[in-house]
Amino acid sequence: MIPNMIQIVAMRAPTLRRPINAAWVRSRSANGWEWFYTHTVGLSVMLSLDTIGRVADWLHVSVSRQDRLPSWQDLKDVKEMFIGRNHEAVQVFPRDEDFVNCHPFCLHLWSPN
């Protein structure tokens, strides 16, 4: 079941599922969101653990670049690093009336926690 992401009722810092590669530098943490950034490939990643309605928690991973959308390989690498090879992740394409775009070059992955 894919939850309606509009119904996020709580957001907090996730517990990372695995150690993060040294190429990723933790740049800041605020309001329960964890940010990591790597200069070597130019990706920014934001993590949060979101409670959505009455559904279980979902790990939310935002992946962005400054000048273009992340590639399939970018998403695959981030999924492996922050979610794990043995966990599922999905992208959600919301209905038009639920669509929010705060960053033109950002994609999101969601994984049941």
Image (cartoon, rainbow, N blue to C red):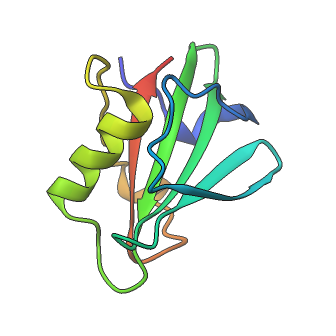
Which image quarter: residue 110?
A: top left
Q: Quadrant of the N terminus?
A: top left
State left or right for residue 1 relative to residue 37. left
Q: Position of residue 25 (x, y in %)?
A: 57, 58
**Which residue is pictured at 30% across the width and 80% down the height?**
68
Between residue 79 and residue 106, name the one nearer to us.
79
Q: Position of residue 84 (x, y in %)?
A: 35, 26
Task: Identify the residue at the far left of this view.
Answer: 72
Vertical comparison of 93 with 59: above or below = below
**Which residue is pictured at 51% across the width and 17% down the height?**
113
Vertical comparison of 97 with 7: above or below = below
Task: Identify the residue at the far right of this view.
Answer: 31
State left or right for residue 55 relative to residue 63. right
**Which residue is pictured at 30% across the width and 34% down the height?**
90
Which image quarter: residue 79?
A: top left
**Which residue is pictured at 28% across the width and 66% down the height?**
70
Task: Identify the residue at the far front of this view.
Answer: 22
State left or right for residue 10 relative to residue 8. right
Between residue 37 and residue 58, name the one nearer to us.
37
